[in-house]
Image (tube, rainbow, N blue to C red):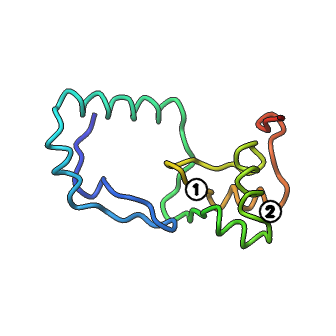
Amino acid sequence: MGTYSEKDFGVVIDGQFHSIDWMPHLVNALSKKVMTNIIDQIEKHLANNPLAVRHGERNFTIDEIASMTNRSVSTVTRHCRIGLLKASKVGKAWLITEKNYSDYKNNVYDANQIIRS
C-alpha cells in the first residue's frame, strides 16, 4: 500500500480527470482500518484485472457513441450489456475507451465475450 495525495482522488467527466480537493478530508474521517481494507480490495482487484488504461486516452459516454455511430442510446447500451461494445460501468454510466470504440466501429469483437440472451 502506497502513500496517496489529494491529486490521487477525483472524478472523470467527459473523459477528463478532475481532482476533488475535499476527498482527503473524507478519507481522514474514515477509520484507518476501513480505509486500509478498501485500498487493499481495490489493489487486489486491479492486480487480478489489469486494465489497459493509458494516460491521455479519451473515454466516451453512451450518448457520444450513439451520436458518432448514428445508433440509438438504447441500442448502444444493449451492445455494452451483451459485450458487442466493451465498456466499463461506473455507477449508472458506461465509459468506452477510444480503442474499444474503434473496435466497435470496425466490427472487431471477441465472440467468447458476447452474452447470448
Work out which quarter of the rendered image holds the N terminus and state it: top left
Residue at which label 2 appears: 105
What residue is at 46 percent from the left and 31 percent from the top?
Answer: 45
- Determine whether the residue tagged by mark 2 lies in a helix, strand or loop: helix
Residue 35: x and y, percent? 24, 34
C-alpha gap between disc 1 and disc 2: 15 Å
Residue 6's place in the image compared with 82, above or below, is below
Dot 1 crowding, Cα within 10 Å, few <14, some 14–19, many 20+: many
In depth, the one of 50 and 22 nearer the eye is 22
The answer to whether residue 92 is above or below residue 50 is: below
Q: Nearer the viewer, residue 49 or 12?
A: 12
Residue at 73% from the left image edge and 72% from the top image edge? 68
SS for dot 1 = strand
In this view, 97 is above or below 69: above
Residue lying at 70% horizontally and 49% vertically, measured from the top left: 80
In the rendered view, does 15 fall on the left or right side of 102?
Answer: left
Quarter of the figure with residue 19? bottom left
Amino acid identity at mark 2: Lys
Camera-nearest label, 1 or 2: 1
Give residue 39's position: percent from left, percent from top: 32, 34
Q: Amino acid at mark 1?
A: Leu
- Does the CB distance between marks 1 and 2 fall below 8 Å? no
The residue where tag 1 is placed is: 95
At 62% from the left and 58% from the top, the residue drawn is: 97
Q: Position of residue 38 (x, y in %)?
A: 32, 32
